[in-house]
Image (cartoon, grey):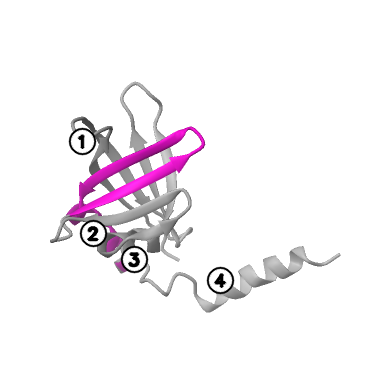
């Protein structure tokens, strides 16, 4: 079985206020071993990188329409949907990030070529995961 990842970079703006924002480099990574997830690693000036794990479907949907619950919300910005906004919430506070939608869409298209949406798990993988779940229920 071939195992490869999809990696990319995205420049996002951390929006502090309507007058102030900071540009951040964000590393994107998709590993088919975890087919439902995309990892975004934010490189903050003066701090250690911070990684958040997103549902791949959330990012696909959020480029075209508002989506998300709880700690992560993603929605398009502008009439032409040329930007995307990501809002992250944690106990320490929240962050609003904006980016051009095109590089994110291109990254997601590459993940879709590697593992098409809806085909994240093959029959054998589903059977193995189900056996693991059911095996944990035995006493």
Q: Does the stretch in magenta take in 104? A: yes
Cα distance in 3D space between marks 3 and 1: 38 Å
Cα distance in 3D space between marks 1 and 2: 26 Å
Which residue lies under the disc numbered 3?
114
Numbered badge on residue 18: 1
Cα distance in 3D space between marks 4 and 3: 16 Å
Which residue lies under the disc numbered 4?
125
Task: Give the label, 3 or 2, closer to the camera.
Answer: 2
Q: Upstream in the sequence, badge 4 or badge 3?
A: 3
| Residue at point 69%, 71% (across, down) | 131
Cα distance in 3D space between marks 3 and 2: 14 Å
Task: Give the label, 3 or 1, closer to the camera.
Answer: 1
Task: Give the label, 4 or 1, closer to the camera.
Answer: 1
Task: Give the label, 1 or 2, closer to the camera.
Answer: 1
The reply to whether callout 4 and callout 1 are in contact (CB within 8 Å) is: no
| Residue at point 44%, 42% (across, down) | 89
Q: Position of residue 137 (x, y in %)?
A: 78, 66
Instruction: For mark 2, give the secondary structure.
Output: helix
Which residue lies under the disc numbered 2?
105
Sort mark 4 into few (<14), some (14-19) or many (20+) by Cα contacts within 10 Å.
few
Relative to 109, is 38 above or below?
A: above
Task: Give the label, 4 or 2, closer to the camera.
Answer: 2
Q: Nearer the viewer, residue 69 or 130?
A: 69
Q: Nearer the viewer, residue 135 or 47?
A: 47
Q: Nearer the viewer, residue 94 or 139?
A: 94
Numbered badge on residue 44: none
Q: Upstream in the sequence, badge 3 or badge 2?
A: 2
């Amino acid at each position: 079985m071939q195992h490869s990842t999809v990696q990319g970079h995205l420049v996002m703006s951390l929006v502090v206020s309507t007058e102030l924002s900071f540009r951040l480099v964000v590393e994107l990574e998709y590993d088919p071993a975890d087919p439902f997830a995309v990892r975004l690693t934010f490189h903050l000036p003066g701090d250690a990188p911070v990684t958040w794990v997103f549902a791949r479907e959330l990012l696909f949907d959020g480029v075209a329409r508002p989506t998300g619950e709880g700690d992560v919300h993603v929605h398009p910005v502008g009439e032409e949907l040329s930007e995307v906004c990501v809002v992250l919430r944690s106990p320490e506070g929240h962050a609003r990030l904006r980016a051009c939608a095109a590089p994110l869409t291109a990254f997601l298209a590459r993940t879709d070529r590697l593992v098409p949406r809806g085909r994240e798990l093959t029959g054998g993988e589903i059977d193995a995961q189900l056996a693991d779940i059911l095996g944990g229920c035995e006493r």
